[in-house]
C-alpha cells in the first residue's frame, strides 16, 4: 500500500488540474448512511419517497417523513461533522493541488471541512428552495416551523410557493450550472480522484468516462471500500479501504514531497 500511496502522491503533486468526484461512501465515516449498500438508506426508506412526482402529489407526507428520519438519526445531516477524508481534501485544495470537488452528496460536509471550489451535483439538503420564485433558506428554518405546528406544508415566506429541499429528486434534471461546471472541470482535468462512489448513477458516472476519452486522457485514481462498477473501464490506480485513512496518508506524503522540493530549491539559492 505504501508504494501506491507514494504513486498517488506523485500524481497529485505533479498535476496541473486535479479534480475530485465524491459519493456517499466518503461520508459514511461521518455517520451518514450510504444509499445502496446492505443497511443503507434505501433498505429502510422507499426511494420512491424521494421522487419529484410523489413529492408534488403529497408534499406534507414527504416533510413528515423528513422530520421522522432526522429524529431517528437515519438522515440527520445537520448534526454530521466532516471526517478525515473531507479535511484531507480541503487541505489539498488549500495547497493548490485539488482545483475542484464535484460531489454527489447533499450533506455540505466538504464546505464544512473548508473546501471552497465545490460543485454540488445533486444539490444540498441543508437548504430549502421555493419551487416558484427560487428563494433559498436554511432547511432548519423550515423544520422549526413544522415542529412548532405553524405549517403542515411549508410555503415560501416571500411568494407563498411550495418549498422542497434544494436537492435533486428522482425525476428531476441536474441543475444546468452544476452540469456545466462539471463538464468544464472534466475537460480541464489531468488527474481525477474518484472517492466513495459506486459509479452507478448517471450523469455523474459519466465524468470518469469523459476524462478518459479526452486527449490527453486524465489519470483516474479510485478510492473505495469495493471496486466501482466502472473500475475496469476507467480506473488506473485502485485503492480499497477507508477513505479517511488513505487520504490522510496521501496528503501527508504530498506535503512531505512539497516540503522537500522547497528545501532543495532553498539549498540551490
Image (cartoon, rainbow, N blue to C red):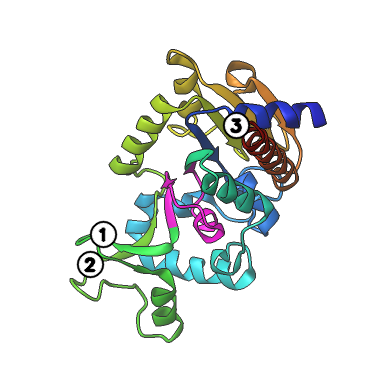
- x, y percentage for residue 261? 65, 34
Report, in whole angstroms, how far the alpha carbon at label 2 lies from the one at label 1: 6 Å
Residue at 44% across, 22% down: 210
Residue at 53% across, 53% down: 110
Whether the magenta-drawn stretch holds residue 114 is answered as: yes
Residue on which disc 3 sits? 12
- x, y percentage for residue 48? 48, 49
Whether the magenta-drawn stretch holds residue 229 is answered as: no
Report, in whole angstroms, how far the alpha carbon at label 2 lies from the one at label 3: 46 Å
Tell me the mark number nearer the camera, choosing from 3 and 1: 3
Residue on which disc 2 sits? 161
Q: Residues within 10 Å of mark 3 (few under 14, many from 20)?
A: many
Q: Is residue 181 left or right of residue 62?
A: left
Q: Is residue 114 left or right of residue 257?
A: left
Instruction: Specify which label sits upstream in the sequence, 2 or 3.
Output: 3
The label shown at residue 131 is 1
Asked if marks 2 and 1 touch (Cβ < 8 Å), the reply is yes
User: Which residue is farthest front?
Assistant: 269
Amino acid at each position: 500500500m505504501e508504494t501506491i500511496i507514494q504513486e498517488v502522491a506523485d500524481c497529485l503533486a505533479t498535476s496541473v488540474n486535479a479534480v475530485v468526484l465524491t459519493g456517499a461512501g466518503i461520508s459514511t465515516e461521518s455517520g451518514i448512511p450510504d444509499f445502496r449498500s446492505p443497511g443503507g438508506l434505501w433498505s429502510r426508506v422507499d426511494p420512491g419517497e424521494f421522487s419529484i412526482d410523489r413529492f408534488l402529489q403529497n408534499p406534507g407526507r414527504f416533510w413528515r417523513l423528513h422530520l421522522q428520519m432526522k429524529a431517528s438519526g437515519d438522515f440527520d445531516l445537520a448534526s454530521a461533522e466532516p471526517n478525515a477524508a473531507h479535511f484531507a481534501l480541503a487541505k489539498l485544495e488549500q495547497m493548490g493541488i485539488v482545483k475542484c470537488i464535484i460531489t454527489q452528496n447533499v450533506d455540505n460536509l466538504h464546505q464544512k471541512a473548508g473546501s471552497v471550489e465545490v460543485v454540488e451535483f445533486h444539490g444540498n439538503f441543508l437548504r430549502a428552495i421555493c419551487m416558484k420564485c427560487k428563494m433559498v433558506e436554511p432547511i432548519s428554518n423550515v423544520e422549526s416551523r413544522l415542529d412548532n405546528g405553524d405549517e403542515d406544508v411549508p410555503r415560501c415566506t416571500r411568494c407563498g410557493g411550495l418549498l422542497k429541499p434544494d436537492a435533486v429528486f428522482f425525476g428531476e434534471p441536474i441543475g444546468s450550472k452544476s452540469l456545466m461546471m462539471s463538464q468544464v472541470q472534466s475537460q480541464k482535468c489531468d488527474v481525477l480522484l474518484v472517492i466513495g462512489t459506486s459509479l452507478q448513477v448517471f450523469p455523474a458516472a459519466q465524468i470518469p468516462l469523459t476524462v478518459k476519452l479526452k486527449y490527453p486522457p486524465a489519470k483516474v485514481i479510485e478510492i473505495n471500500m469495493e471496486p466501482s462498477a466502472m473500475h475496469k473501464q476507467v480506473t488506473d490506480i485502485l485503492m480499497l479501504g477507508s477513505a479517511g485513512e488513505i487520504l490522510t496518508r496521501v496528503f501527508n506524503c504530498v506535503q512531505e514531497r512539497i516540503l522537500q522540493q522547497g528545501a532543495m530549491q532553498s539549498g540551490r539559492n
